[in-house]
Image (cartoon, grey):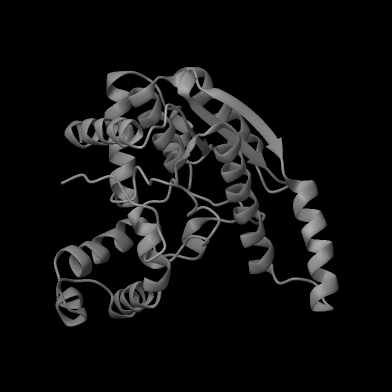
């Protein structure tokens, strides 16, 4: 994992140099993926060149705020908090008039992600920052992401890593120096787009999801071969169908740093 970390740090530094960016910005949510991306960027460019933005809504937990602030402190990031809830409320009112009814839950969830993406892109335009998209391979493989929202960016530092690998990567980096609070590694992953939301409400456990994706994508195994390896047929089939159905999203993703 240390070798992968070094490749990501070197890759980000080289990408910024080649594309004439001195600074990057990202949404620092209090979750693991954005935390790891922030530390990679700080290692590559120095914390003062990493502009981390916590874009909170009514669904943002106090723990997420505390974690984001702590990550910024540990890594000497340029950190700010923006309350985007008034913008979400305004859009909800507008769409209520468009639809003639209350917007569905998924509409409101994606509005939050897109408002965050829009804010980061505005910062990029204003200050010439490279926007980092913080999605991982488990999410993008299954389409557990929002087009023009959390997929916004010019580079995806951990886009070639499965979620289970990001946990390993975080622990490896912390073994060198404590740059990530333990809470961000141990807490249950959540997009916090709705109250009480957890990733595993929508996806199989990451240990299962990643194992099946590895066999199907990297190992080129069929559904029958995967189930013969001991995975529950219904779950494996759901993962494969989901992967196939979400190809349209993957075609629109920013480039991910290579790890091979």
Left or right of residue 175: residue 26: right
Q: Which residue is found at the position 46% from the left and 48% from the top?
A: 153
The answer, for residue 196, to whether it is visible in the render is no
Location of the N terminus (image quadrant): top left
Answer above or below: position of 37 versus 49. below
Answer above or below: position of 244 versus 106. below
Left or right of residue 195: residue 130: left
Answer above or below: position of 139 versus 86. below
Residue 21, given in percent of the width and then of the height, sits at: 41, 32
Q: Which residue is found at the position 50% from the left and 41% from the top?
A: 31
Answer above or below: position of 55 versus 106. above
Residue 255, given in percent of the width and then of the height, sits at: 34, 51
Q: Which residue is found at the position 69% from the left and 62% from the top?
A: 108
Quarter where residue 243 is shown: bottom left
Left or right of residue 164: residue 4: left
Residue 104, given in percent of the width and then of the height, sits at: 71, 72
Between 244 and 26, the residue placed more toward the observer is: 26
Between 18 and 199, the residue placed more toward the observer is: 18
Between 135 and 215, the residue placed more toward the observer is: 135
Q: Which residue is found at the position 47% from the left and 35% from the top?
A: 184
């Amino acid at each position: 994992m240390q070798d992968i970390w070094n490749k990501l740090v070197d890759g980000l530094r080289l990408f910024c140099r080649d594309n004439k960016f001195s600074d990057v910005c990202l949404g620092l949510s209090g979750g693991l993926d954005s935390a790891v991306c922030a530390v990679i960027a700080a290692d590559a460019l120095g914390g003062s060149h990493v502009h981390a933005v916590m874009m909170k809504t009514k669904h943002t937990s106090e723990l997420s705020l505390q974690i984001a602030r702590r990550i910024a402190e540990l890594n000497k990031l340029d950190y700010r908090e923006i309350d985007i809830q008034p913008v979400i409320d305004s859009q909800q009112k507008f769409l209520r008039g468009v639809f003639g009814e209350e917007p569905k839950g998924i509409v409101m969830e994606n509005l939050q992600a897109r408002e965050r993406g829009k804010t980061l892109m505005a910062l990029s335009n204003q200050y010439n920052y490279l926007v980092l998209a913080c999605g991982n391979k488990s999410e993008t493989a299954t389409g557990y992401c929002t087009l023009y929202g959390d997929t916004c960016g010019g580079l995806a530092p951990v886009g070639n890593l499965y979620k289970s690998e990001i946990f390993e990567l975080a622990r490896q980096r912390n073994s060198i120096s404590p740059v990530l609070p333990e809470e961000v590694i141990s807490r249950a992953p959540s997009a916090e787009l709705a109250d009480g939301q957890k990733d595993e409400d929508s996806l199989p456990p990451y240990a299962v999801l990643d194992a099946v994706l590895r066999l199907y994508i990297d190992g080129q195994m069929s559904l029958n071969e995967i189930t013969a390896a001991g995975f529950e047929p219904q779950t494996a089939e759901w993962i494969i169908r989901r992967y196939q159905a979400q190809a349209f999203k993957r075609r629109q993703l920013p480039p991910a740093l290579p790890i091979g």
